[in-house]
Amino acid sequence: MDNRRKISVIAVSTNGHGPNRIIPNNEEHNLEIDAPSDMIMENLPTYRPTELKSLGVLPDSILISVFAYLTPIDLIRCTHVCHRWHLLVSHHQQLWRRLFLRPDCSNGFIGAVHVRHIDKFISMIGTRCASALVCIDLPVELITVEILRVLANHCPNLEYLTLDFSSAMQLHDFNDLNEFPCNLKRLCVCLSEVIFLEAFMRRIYGYISSLNTLHIIGTMEKSSIPSPEETDTYETINISKIKTHAPNLRIINLYGIGFIDDNHIELIASGCMHLQCLALNFCVRVRGTSFKNLMNRCAKLQCLLLQNTGIEDEAMLTVNWSSTQLTELDISSTELTEKGLLEFFSRVPKLTYLAVSYCDGFTDKVLQLLMERGTLNGCRALDLSNTVNLNVETTHHLLISSPGVTYRLEALNYTGCDAITEQFWIDSIRFLHRIKILIIGTAHSWFRQMSRRIHIDQILESCAIHCPHLKRFEIQWDPETLRFSENSSKFIDHLRVRCTNLLSFVLSDGPYYEGTKANFERAERFSVVRTTTMYQTSIVGALNFYKELRFN
């Protein structure tokens, strides 16, 4: 009754001024987020529809709670709706905790804001964002002395900063740069192919001692990985000085940097004693000769990501892996041999994350060794995709006869095998009760001229029955390979109703994709079903350091 009375008072007080009444200036200081509102959602249907026709009847606290879910772009649009909304958005700094300013930013659902007037932007940082700003990324045109000075003086709680020099052809003059945010927890620097950053970095070395996460992103693209001989050796940023001035680093991500080699890893090992995660994906010059010192000096290192590196058997076997804390390992697309992997995995402790996709040396013998030693017991994520020398029978035995593995398994990627049938997955899914990420099928199976056709209905039914925690599901078989019955909508219904946590369901574009998408949209779940041409699922979300490793 009290709730109903409160709504009536609000409705009466606003009816005389219209839904977009102007709040006098003396009310601006009252625009603060209050304690949880008296409005209870379960009571809302009892109100007459006429009382909730306009958002003008809602109190400020409710509107602020709604605005908190909007992106910065949408917040800017809200300021143009009416004076009341303009005041609400402009005077609540907690709505401006994150700003993504690069035009090509695809940081989830946040969206990027394009800055047209730098002077107005500087003023907005000092007033609208100020102490509430926690995360910001800057394109090269906004990396100026004035903006960095405002961030240093007016944003004491800024923790995440991205500096994108990737498109730079010329830098601003930083000789007058004497102020820089000093409470940063994460710094991401996107390198340029033609610009040396040492002149800029010299001005900020004294301010980065608080860092615990460092991203340095190179210019090497996954689609065209050059050989080490083809990459240039120009060191556009000084790794040695960074590790000297940031001794408390826990996570280091060096992605696609052509000049990074084992000498740089030695430097990191000598100065980062607290290191827990090192990612060297697409650093093709890394051979692994530095890993012995790295693992000896960085005793806390748990996560080592080496996708598309040049690691060699001999270098990897010089390390006493049995005495390390290593639990997460990615050796995808490396040239390690079967002999080297057998020796390597005979020393490695139990792993909670293992990715070996496109690793030709990963064979039946290697997987059998892991099963015999119990290395994968308690494993949470496993990527066996496109392992051409691994037979289906061995993988099938792992999934149906190793409860120590499947009991804890939360993410599985086993794609790229032509010999798999639907019965393989119907049998295996029964044991994946905790699975959250599942990627199956064979992309471009039409090109491989697969003779088998996969009946998808029973696979979906198995997931609906045995995988209640499923969040991300990808099926890579193309329309020419998939078969489904006239009653396929029934099995799609079962998956949709029983897997309530499902966030993405990825399928190849075709009739089955269209039918599945329409099914979910009828249930008002519009963004769940996606196509493989626009979206790709990965198990990296199961990494312990996934949130820290994310970058754009």
Image: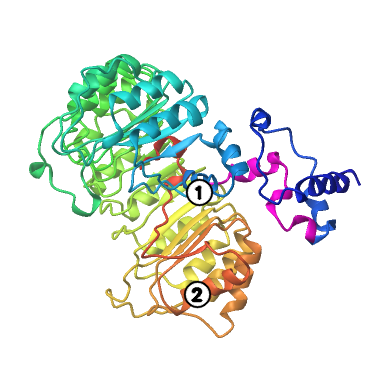
How crowded pointer 1 is (Cα within 10 Å; few <14, some 14-19, many 20+) is rated as: few
Would residue 115 be found to the left or right of residue 288 on screen?
right
Q: Is residue 228 visible?
A: yes
- Dot 2: element: loop
Picture coordinates of residue 342, whole percent (x, y): 30, 44
Residue that numbered label 2 is attached to: 456
Residue found 29% across the figure and 23% down from its top:
145
Picture coordinates of residue 404, whole percent (x, y): 54, 47
In this orientation, which residue lies closer to the viewer: 342 or 417? 417
Spatial distance from mark 2 to mark 1, Cα to Cα? 44 Å
Picture coordinates of residue 64, whole percent (x, y): 64, 40
Q: Amino acid at mark 1?
A: Arg
Q: How many marks?
A: 2
- Dot 1: element: helix
Residue that numbered label 1 is attached to: 77
Residue stretch in magenta: 50-70
The image shows residue 78, relative to residue 318, as above or below, that is below
Q: Amino acid at mark 2?
A: Ile
Picture coordinates of residue 27, whole percent (x, y): 68, 31
In this orientation, which residue lies closer to the viewer: 358 or 198? 198
Image depth: mark 2 or mark 1 in front: 1
Residue found 8% across the figure and 44% down from its top:
230
In this orientation, which residue lies closer to the viewer: 459 or 32? 32
Would residue 67 be found to the left or right of residue 270 on screen?
right
> Residue lying farthest bottom?
486
